Structure formats: C-alpha cells, structure tokens
Amino acid sequence: MSAEEFSSRMLMKEGLNDTGCEEYDKHCDGLNTRKPRVFYNKHLPSKFDWRDHAGVVGPVLDQRGCLACWAFSVVGVMESKMVIQKSKYYHRLSVQELIDCSDLTNHCHGGNVAFAMKYLCRNMLPITWEERYPLTLEDENCRFKPTTGVLLESFTVHCNVLAMKIIDFIVNEGPVTAAVNAENWVHYLDGIIQYHCSSSPLRHVVQIVGYDFTTQPPHFIIKNSWGKDFGIEGYVKIAMGNFICGIGKQIGYLSVR
C-alpha cells in the first residue's frame, strides 16, 4: 500500500481517540474506593514479557478493514486481567460485542478507549465469550447485551506517562492499552523503531505486553491487531523514551471482576 492507502485503510481518523488528555481514574461501583497507586520501580526486572506466562496473552488478531483497534486493545487487556487476577484459564472474549453494544461513537470507523471503558463501567456491561458473540468485523446493531461474562471493575487512563511508570504498570498490573502514532509502520518488518516516528497523531491503539532493558536501545513489546503477517508475527518493538510513536501519551490499565 502507498502511505495514503495505509493511512485510510489501517488508521482511525485523527482526533477520534483524543480525549484532550483528560485523565480518568474510576471504580465502577461508584464509590471511588480505589487505593492510591504504589510504585515499585526500584525492584523491576531488566526485562519482562507477559507472553512468557502461560495463557496471559491471547493470539494476535486481524482487524482487517474494521478500524476497531480501540476494542481489540481493551478486550485483549480484559482477557489478560481475567487470567492474572482470577487465576482462570485464558478464554477469548467478544471484541464484536464491544464494537456493537458500547455506544454510537465506537465502531468499525474508529473509537475511543477511555469512552469505551467509561461506558462499560457506567452500564456494568459484561463482555461475553467470543463463541457467544463472534467477530464479524462489521458495524452491526447490538445483537444482545449479555448478563454474564467479564465485568470491568475499575479503569485508569493516564496522559504523558514516562517509561519507568509504564514499566511499573506492566509488571504490577498486566498488559496496558496505548494510543500510538502508527503512520510510519507501513514498511515495518522487524527491529526496534527508534527514529522518524513522532508522538502524534494518535490514530491507532495497541497493547504493551512487555519490555526489555537488555537491548540497545531498550524497548517496549507491542501487540498489534493487524494479523500475524505484520511485523514480528504481529508484534512491534518500540524504543523507550521521548514518546517515540506516541508511546506514553495515553496509557490505560484496568481491573476486572
């Protein structure tokens, strides 16, 4: 694809995932009883990858023509948290349900991670299993709103997060969502992106599942939603620091119940 084709087919319109860098910290029972975050970055390992923990990170999916990266990232993190928090076996959750049922601003033309999590939280909408609500990669009316599944317990969205704090989130919370500038990923095959990838615009959303300080330069491990044929079997490596590709401009993590 040309740069223009790549931009129109693979990336959301500019501004859809922009909350004006408004930060959210919400407990879904409405009581705002969240405990203050404690950071443990003095004791963080030199490298960490949730893929090394059996059943935590699900398979790489392909959004194809449906620009619902926001939904793939939120649901992917919910799947991981279901295993980490609840000690359950990995079970794929329905991305299509979130596309269809969250609200009218989130769909296959793009969406907003913070607004999607806010909707799940406010409406106590559980995300059901993939086999009950299969992925079609099309905008559809909400087929049904499940009464059972995985519920969001709380969520946090932080803006302009430095690398060490992101690392702390990953190790102590699990995979996180990240809004990114992926405009220059059209030719990415392998290696660590460290040049010519600015911090904006944020037209794509991914998951950060790990990091590695033992490489030069140190990098984050990014799970994408463009299928296994893209990049490193569906993954991307991005250098830490200076908000390369926008990493850190908008980070989200959550808990489930």
Image: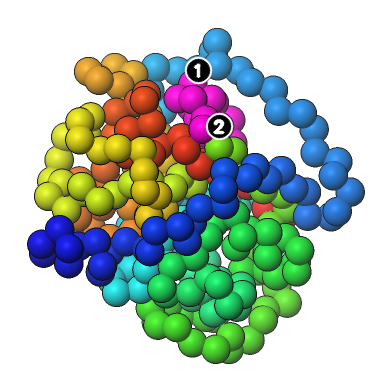
Q: Up-down: is 4 above or below 130?
A: above
Task: Identify the colour scheme used.
Answer: rainbow
Of labels 1 and 2, the one closer to you: 2
Residue 169 part of the magenta segment = yes
At a point 25% along the width and 20% down the height, the residue shown is 217
* Element class at badge 2: helix
Residue 193 part of the magenta segment = no
At a point 86% along the width and 41% down the height, the residue shown is 33
Q: Which mark is residue 44?
A: 1
At a point 37% along the width and 48% down the height, the residue shown is 201
Using a 10 Å C-alpha cutoff, classify the residue at mark 2 as few (fewer than 14 neighbours), some (14 to 19) or many (20 or more).
Answer: many
**Quadrant of image for the N terminus:** bottom left
Callout 2, which amino acid?
A: Phe
Q: Nearer the viewer, residue 231 or 7?
A: 7
Q: Nearer the viewer, residue 54 or 182?
A: 182
Tell me if I can see residue 61 in this picture: no
Q: Judge left or right: residue 161 versus residue 68.
A: right
Callout 1, which amino acid?
A: Leu
Q: Up-down: is 83 above or below 118?
A: above
Earlier residue among tags 1 and 2: 1
Q: Up-down: is 141 above or below 97?
A: below
Tell me if I can see residue 149 in this picture: yes
Q: Judge left or right: residue 224 versus residue 42.
A: left
Give the image location of residue 137, x and y in percent: 38, 78
Q: Which mark is residue 24?
A: none
Magenta stretch, residue numbers:
160-174
At a point 49% along the width and 25% down the height, the residue shown is 162
Give the image location of residue 234, x and y in percent: 25, 52
Using a 10 Å C-alpha cutoff, classify the residue at mark 1 as few (fewer than 14 neighbours), some (14 to 19) or many (20 or more).
Answer: some
Give the image location of residue 212, x and y in percent: 33, 24
Q: Judge left or right: residue 200 versus residue 101.
A: left
Q: Which mark is residue 169?
A: 2
